Image (cartoon, rainbow, N blue to C red):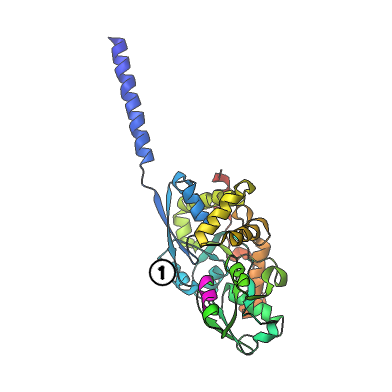
Amino acid sequence: MKSAISFRVSIAACALLLSSGVQAQTTTPQQIHVLTLLGRPVQFVVADKQGLFARYGIEVVNDNKKNSDELRADLAAGKGDVAYLAVDNAVAMVELAHQDVVIVMGGEGSQNELIAQPGVKSAADLRGKTLIVDAPNTAYALQMKKILLLSGLAAGKDYEIKPFGATPQRLIAMREQKDFAGSMLGPPVSLVAKKEGFVSLGSVQQLIGPYQAAGFFTQRAWAKDHRDLLVAFLSASIEAQRWLLNPANKQQVIDLLAAQYHLAPDIAAEDYEMSMTHSGGFARDAQLDLRGFENVLKLRAEVEGQWGGHPPSPDKYYDPSYYQAALVKAK
């Protein structure tokens, strides 16, 4: 009789364990709403395909905006949790919109080039012309202003700047309207443009140096109130970036870039080389490039006259504690 009771107890215990396991597996993932500018970032695609977001118990809802002004406004209004965008936008939110925003992780450097219409020989040929940007007072527009300053051309005096939207839209506009003389474009769009006969007048890497481009930022209060969720999201993103940068996955990444951005195989292969194997591309472990971020602040001080020309410490805008916690958690 005792053995029968023990058997029934064991069966009941196993059933309870199995039931709790099923409940754990079917727990509703926590949603995080991420605002982006150029569609679903390739890291997110990888994290979905590899089951990384699911393993960390999160679901990423990606909201793609048409320009950075709209994205910043939505983040300020609480219509998104986290933004993945050039981190100079976070600085602009703090300094221009007086939002308590914090950068929590890096992601990519900048391989932007000043791309001009076919037939343009030098920056001097842009005098009196119209150049198009996403927003006139942030990020890549400041890169363009600096590059043209090096050739003695000042915005508003020697050329006109027109806001137009994200990178792919700017190339389309330059194809359709030859009066749009140039813009800052990055890969893969810059690669497509050059193949079509557009001209590169120089790159950020050559003329400006290291530059921290896309990274993750959010409202400081949201980060504090959702620390575990944020760290889980960053951990999954770090793992996805590691997969992208692993040479063993090269062909898979090229195929993914081709499918994700509708690229010809040769353009996808060139995009891989630039983005995954060269400085200024995807950063190891999605680390924020502090030297590159100092350059971001220096550029804003010099070109826009922010802070009386004397940039503050990166610590004002970057809290590394979330990234450090995510790095420990990432496998």
Residue 261 lies, in percent from the top left, at 52, 62
Q: In this view, does 212 lie above or below 232?
A: below
Closer to us: 27 or 66: 66
Q: Quadrant of the C terminus?
A: top right
**How many numbered markers are drawn?**
1
User: Label 1 amino acid?
Assistant: Ala
Residue 291 lies left or right of residue 29; in this view the side is right
- Residue under pointer 1: 77
Residue 187 lies, in percent from the top left, at 60, 65
Q: In which quarter of the image is the N terminus?
A: top left
Q: Look at the numbered disc 1 and give the secondary structure of its residue.
A: loop
Residue extending farthest to the left is 1
Closer to us: 306 or 117: 117
What residue appears at the point 44 percent right and 54 percent down from the top-left corner?
Answer: 226
Closer to us: 47 or 209: 47
Say if residue 310 shows up in the picture.
yes
Residue 87 lies left or right of residue 34; in this view the side is right
Q: In this view, does 98 lie above or below 221?
A: below
Name the magenta segment's main secondary structure. helix
Tell me the magenta residue range: 168-173
Say if residue 153 shows up in the picture.
no
Q: Is residue 41 above or below residue 240?
A: below
